[in-house]
Amino acid sequence: MRDAPREPLDPRQALARAEAGLPVTIRLLDPPLHEFLPKESAEIAALTADMGKTVAEVERTIESLSEVNPMLGLRGCRLGIMYPEITAMQARAVLEAAADATKAGFKARPEIMIHLAAKVGGIGANRENPGTFFYENLMMGAQLLEEARVHGIAKFVTIGTVCAYPKFTRVPFREDDLWEGYPEETNAPYGVAKKALLVQGQAYRQQFGMNAIYVLPVNLYGPFDHFDPSVSHVIPALIKKFEDAIEARADHVEVWGTGNASREFLFVEDAARGIVDATEKYDAPEPVNLGAGFEITMRDLAELLQKLSGFEGELRFDPTKPDGQPRRCLDTSRAEAAFGFKARVSFEEGLKRTIEWYRNNKNSPH
C-alpha cells in the first residue's frame, strides 16, 4: 500500500505528477452549485474550471468565488483551491494558474471534499454517450476518492444520482432498495458508475477508516441549469422549448414520451442546503436520499410549465421517444431524521424562478 502523506501536493507538484502520467486532484464543483461556495471555507472548496479553459478564464473563475456566501460562510468556512478534472495534456494551463493563485494567498489544504462534478445529460445524451458517461464518471470519482485518501482528507462527500436506483423500485425509493435490481437502461452506465463510488467509499471506510458519505439527490433544477438541448434535462429543455415557441409564434411544442412517466424534482437551493447539512452532520456509511417528497407526471409537468411560461399553443407528445424510468420519488425520512432535512421551496415557486432566470440570461454566456 502506498504511503498516505498528510500534506496535499502544491500546484507545481501536482503538475509534475500529471506530466508523469500520475493522477492529480479532480474537479469537485461545477456550475450551478459553485455559487454556494463562500470565500471563507473550512478548506472545503475551490477553483472550478472546465477542461480546456485558458489561464485567464481560470483566473476569472478564482475571482468569481471571492464573495462570502451565507450558506457556508456562517459555518466559519474559508475558500481553498481545488484543481479541475484534467488529463496530463491539459494540466499545465490550469495548474500554472492555480500556482499563481496560491501565491496570491489561496491554500490547497482541504479538510473536506464534496464531489459534485459529473458528466451528465438527459435521456438523449445518455443514449448517445453510454461509454463516455460510464468511463468519465467512474474515473473522475474513483481517482478523486483515492487522492483524498492519500492526502489524508478528513471527510469525503460523494454526490450520487437517483439514476442508480433499479428501474422497477418500490415507490417511494428507499436507500435499502438500491441493490434490488438493475437501473433503467438509458441511464444505467451513468447510474452504475456513480453507484460504484458508494461501494468505494464504504470499502475505504472499512479498510482505511475514511469518513466517506454518499448523498443521493433526486432530479435537480433551478437557475444556472444547462439549457443546451444536447445535454439538458427535462425542465430546462421544456422551458427553452416554450420560450423559443413563444418567440417564433409556433402553434405547438413537442414533448418526448407518452407523458405517463413521473419524476420528483428538488430545487437547487434546497439541494445545496441539504448537501451542506449532510456534510456537517451525517457520518454514516449508508447512502442518504435528498428529495422534495412528491412526484409529478411528465404530462402534468409540461402543462404546468406551459401555463407558467404563457405559451398558448398545443402540446404534442411523441410516444416514439423514450419515457425513461417509469416512476421516481424518494423516501427522505433518513435525511430528516439524521440532519433535519426538508425541502423549503415549493415546486411552482422554483419553476417561476427558473423561468425568470432563463429569460434574463438566455442571451448571455453562463
Image (spheres, grey):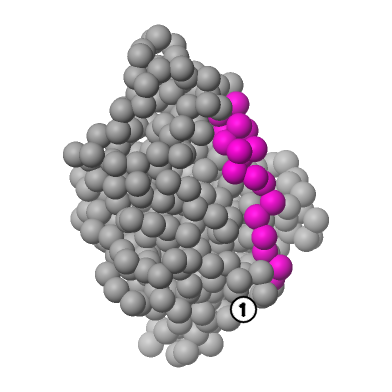
Camera-side residue: 288 or 42? 288
Residue 108, by quadrant, is bottom right
Camera-side residue: 273 or 113? 273
In x, y percent, where is residue 34? Answer: 58, 46
SS assignment for the magenta stretch, majority: helix
- Region of the chain picked out in magenta, as a range: 339-357
Q: Is residue 325 above or below residue 206?
A: above
**Which residue appears at 47% of the width and 60% of the height?**
329
In x, y percent, where is residue 36? Answer: 65, 48
Q: Visible in this render: residue 274?
A: yes
| Residue to which mark 1 is pinned | 283
Q: Is residue 322 above or below residue 204?
A: above
In x, y percent, where is residue 159? Answer: 49, 62
Q: Visible in this render: residue 226?
A: no
Q: Is residue 282 magenta?
A: no
Left or right of 56? Residue 22 is left
Camera-side residue: 7 or 126? 126
| Quadrant of the snapshot with the N terminus | bottom left
**Which residue appears at 53% of the width and 67% of the height?**
331
Q: Is residue 124 above or below residue 353?
A: below
Left or right of 26? Residue 127 is left
**Which residue appears at 77% of the width and 49% of the height?**
70
Camera-side residue: 53 or 17? 53
In x, y percent, where is residue 173? Answer: 46, 68
Left or right of 126? Residue 73 is right
Query: Disc 1 on helix, strand or loop?
Result: loop
How would you rate the neighbour count of disc 1 (Cα within 10 Å): few for under 14, some for 14-19, many for 20 or more? some
Left or right of 317? Residue 177 is right
**Which residue appears at 60% of the width and 26% of the height?**
356
